Image: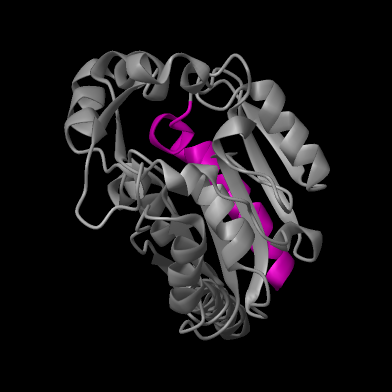
């Protein structure tokens, strides 16, 4: 047999090489497009996460990690927890400095804050509530928790009252008592983690939870709501009521009040669902 018969013909070699080159080029282009889509500020809105009472920004850590991994710019400004009007103004001032579209997310009392803070902010394209208060105009926050809420018990069994300098007459800082924190506020969180969260909780003033809310931003901005079906702080029934009233796209998760700690993937998915509406 002649060796020349075993050699591939030149046109075939050229064709195969061209096909391989095309595949490599397409793969590189797809990767570049994916990287461009994931770059902060290019195709993703900024997600601003607002914590609630008896918490701080670290409660969002697992959600932040997920969102950043998927290419979202994320900010977690501190919520002062001093009064609804002032807290809302603080968050609104922060959001107003962010260029481009914003997804504003609130947990617990943080939901009341974003409801007020987003009013009139053109760059806020969606509101996301996570086990959160979504008050209507004129409503106060704490009564919205529900008759079966752990917060509805005798206040002396729920809170530690701590005076603070310059407080209006009768106002105090409210800290959750340890048992209430561990069994109701952080139910579903591993005990060691819950104990750490209890020790580092930030108080809210009594007055902050008992002042009237303003015009709700959810009347003009699309909203999403995650209901924690095992929540003992804001009862699931009250969460569903507020979500329906806000005409929110709603998902339910078998979580306690700290869904962003125990179910960060579910929270992250809901935020990303909301974010897709801005594209």
* Residue name at image x 24 percent, y 19 percent: 178
Can you tell which quarter of the image residue 45 is in? bottom right
Residue 188, given in percent of the width and then of the height, sits at: 40, 18
Residue 106 sits inside the magenta stretch? no
Task: Provide the major secondary structure of the magenta segment.
Answer: helix
Q: Is residue 266 above or below residue 94?
A: above
Q: Nearer the viewer, residue 151 or 44?
A: 151
* Residue name at image x 56 percent, y 41 percent: 130
Side of 241 where 103 appears, left or right: left
Q: Is residue 130 above or below residue 159?
A: below
Residue 67, given in percent of the width and then of the height, sits at: 45, 56
* Residue name at image x 44 percent, y 14 percent: 154
Residue 276 sits inside the magenta stretch? yes
Magenta-drawn segment: 257-279
Residue 265, given in percent of the width and then of the height, sits at: 49, 39
* Residue name at image x 26 percent, y 24 percent: 194
Q: Is residue 74 above or below residue 230?
A: below
Side of 100 where 54 appears, left or right: left
Q: Nearer the viewer, residue 266 or 203?
A: 203
């Amino acid at each position: 047999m002649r060796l020349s018969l075993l050699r591939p013909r030149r046109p075939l070699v050229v064709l195969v090489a061209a096909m391989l080159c095309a595949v490599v080029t397409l793969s590189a282009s797809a990767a570049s497009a994916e990287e461009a889509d994931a770059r902060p500020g290019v195709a993703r809105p900024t997600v601003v996460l607002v914590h609630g009472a008896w918490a701080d920004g670290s409660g969002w850590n697992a959600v932040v990690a997920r969102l950043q991994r998927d290419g979202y710019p994320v900010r977690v400004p501190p919520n002062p927890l001093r009064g609804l009007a002032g807290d809302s103004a603080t968050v609104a001032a922060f959001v107003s400095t962010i260029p481009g579209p914003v997804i504003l997310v609130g947990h617990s009392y943080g939901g009341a804050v974003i409801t007020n803070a987003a009013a009139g902010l053109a760059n806020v394209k969606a509101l996301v509530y996570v086990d959160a208060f979504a008050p209507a105009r004129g409503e106060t926050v704490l009564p919205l928790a529900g008759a079966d809420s752990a917060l509805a018990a005798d206040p002396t069994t729920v809170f530690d009252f701590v005076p603070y300098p310059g407080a209006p007459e009768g106002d105090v800082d409210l800290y959750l008592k340890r048992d209430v924190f561990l069994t109701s506020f952080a139910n579903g969180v591993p005990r060691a983690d819950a104990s750490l969260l209890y020790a580092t909780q930030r108080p809210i003033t009594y007055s902050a939870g008992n002042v009237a809310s303003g015009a709700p931003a959810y009347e003009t901005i699309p909203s999403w709501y995650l209901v924690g079906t095992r929540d003992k702080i804001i009862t699931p029934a009250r969460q569903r009521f507020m979500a329906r009233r806000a005409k929110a796209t709603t998902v339910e998760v078998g979580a306690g009040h700290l869904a962003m700690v125990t179910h960060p993937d579910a929270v992250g998915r809901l935020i990303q669902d909301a974010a897709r509406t801005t594209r």
